[in-house]
Every structure is written in C-alpha cells, then in structure tokens.
Amino acid sequence: MTEIFLKTLPFFGLIGLGWAAAASRFFPPEAAAWLTKFVFYFALSAMLFRFAAGLDLGALFDLRFVLAYLAGSTLVWAIGMTVGRWRGLPLSDAAMEAQCCMTGNTGFLGVPMLVVLLGERAVGPVLMVLTIDMLVFSTLITLIIHGARQGGLRGAAILPVLRGVAANPMILSMVAGLSWSLLHLPMPGPLDEFLTILGQAATPGALFAIGASLAGRQLRRMAASGWLGFAKLVLHPLAVGVAALLLAVEPFSAGVMIAAAALPVAGNVYILAQHFGVGQQRVSTAILISTAFSIVTIPLVIGLIAA
C-alpha cells in the first residue's frame, strides 16, 4: 500500500503545485483558464487520439463491462437524485447532485494517472468509462435540466445538446483514433512523434490545471458537499465493483473500472453547474473535498484491487 501511495504522490504533487501557484496569484485565473483550454483541445486530445489509434476496436468493446459500469453508475446516480429530492431540492438541483455522485475526473486525472499506474492495458477500459460518462450521463443531465426549465423536452432542445456532445474534443479525438484503427491505417513516424510530444504535455498540464482551478474554491455547504464526496469516492466504486462481480467482468478490466469510479468529482460538472446556474457552490466544494480525500482513497482502492 505504501508503494502505491508513493506512486500516486507525484500526481497529487502536481495538483498541489498548481494550487500553490494559483493561490499565491503567481498563476492568475486567466492563465489557469487558458492552460485548461490548451490541455482540453490539444494535449489531451492528442493523447486520446494516439491511444485510440493503437487499440483493437473489437477487443475494446466488452458488453459486460459496459453493462456493469452503466448499472453501477446509474444506481449511484439514482441514489443521488433520490437524496436530493428527499431534501426538498428542485429537479435540476437534485440532478446536478446526482451527476456529482458518479462523474469522475477521468479525462484530466484518470487517463494520465491510471495508465501510468496500471499499464498500457488500462487504456481501453479507461476510454470506455470516459465515453460512457460523456455520451450517456452528460447528455442525461443536460436533457433533464432543459426539460425541467421548459416543462418538457422538445426536439428543438434535444438537437443542440446532441450536437454539443458530438463536438466535444475528447469524443472527437477518440472517434478519430478508433476510425484510424478500424481502417488499419499506418501511423507515419513524424505524426506519431508529433502526437507523442503533444500528448506528453497532457499529464503535467492537466494536473497543474486541476490544482489551479481548486485555488479559488471555498468550503461552503459542507454537509451536502461532504455527502456528494462520499458518494463519489466510496459508493460509486463499490457499486460498479459489485456490478462487475455479478456480471463476471474480466478481472483486470473490472479493476480499472473500479479505479476509474474512485476518481474525485470531475471539473466539467462545475462547468455544467455554472452554465445552468444550478448548485455551483455545492459542486465546487464537492470537487475540492473529493480531490483532497482522493489522495488517500485512490491508493487504497488500487491496493485493494491489486490484492
């Protein structure tokens, strides 16, 4: 366990460095925003394209894996929604809390960290988790909020949501990479080197950007946010782990799925909360709390998986 903790420490060290740089105002909020944009649109997209282009599409898709992750995540999402409604929250707020309970920071933290910790075999399962989160649950929360505000869903509201999901650079880069793999196209040396160099900027850039984005967050609404952090760090990996066991998912892929589910609340949930004006403070604090506690919980989960 100590060895795993020491392996994860550099990743959280980069997050801490980003936090310190932003908290001291050496790295202003504008710089953090532009760094995030660089990572999101360029470095991480290059990494995802290169990973996906090297995958066997037939070997990537595992129906049991997909069903297990969907079942466990949907259960936790439903629990989050039920608890929110029981506390008297409006539908949009309860849905945003449900999103916090099961949407992990797979893109910025999971892809770079889990591939390093668990090896190249983890690429396929991590990309599957990322794809399901973006295609299924990001679409779901957006449709629910649109429907709650407009008194129901209309075709005119659904199409822009679907276009927005399809235009996500992470989705586009993975689809492009998988298409490249499916067509069995050769990867020219200069292109591979270009993608490698650009993709190598994703890990330090993403982790530094996560830390910088945490510097401006304040601890408020601690009870609600603490519950959201607990659901994300404990309930989510537990639920997908049980689902993977019941559906007999291949052990290594199941382990990657559980590790991905143990990641802290994703920053894009706050972007959605801010965009819709729903539960920003609760989401912000949940991101801060879950990221801080994940320094301990992620090594613990990976250690249990390895054991």
Image: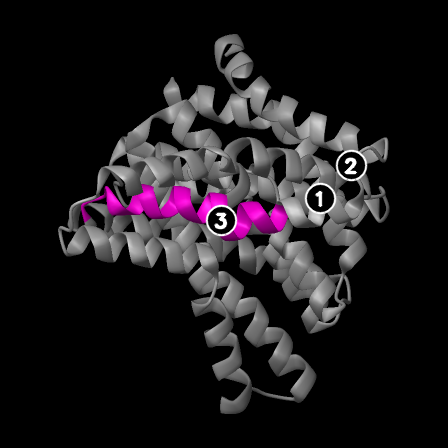
Residue occupying image coordinates x 55% and y 57% = 77
Q: Secondary structure at mark 2?
A: loop
Given contact means CB atoms under 8 Å apart, are the residues at marks 1 and 2 in contact? yes
Query: How far is mark 2 from mark 3, CA to CA?
Result: 21 Å
Q: Check disc 1 and report the residue beneath it.
A: 32
Q: Secondary structure at mark 1?
A: helix
Q: Specify start and end residues of the magenta stretch as a single range.
A: 36-56
Query: How far is mark 3 from mark 1, CA to CA?
Result: 15 Å
Answer left or right for 13 relative to 47: right
Given contact means CB atoms under 8 Å apart, are the residues at marks 3 and 1 in contact? no
Q: Look at label 2 and name its amino acid.
A: Phe
Which of the labelled discs sits on residue 42, or is there none? 3
Given contact means CB atoms under 8 Å apart, are the residues at marks 2 and 3 in contact? no
Q: Secondary structure at mark 3?
A: helix
Q: Look at label 1 and name its amino acid.
A: Ala
Do we see residue 198 in this rendering? yes
Label 2 Cα crowd, 10 Å radius (few <14 / some 14-19 / many 20+):
some
Q: Check disc 2 and report the residue beneath it.
A: 27
> Which residue appears farthest toward the top when viewing the image?
2
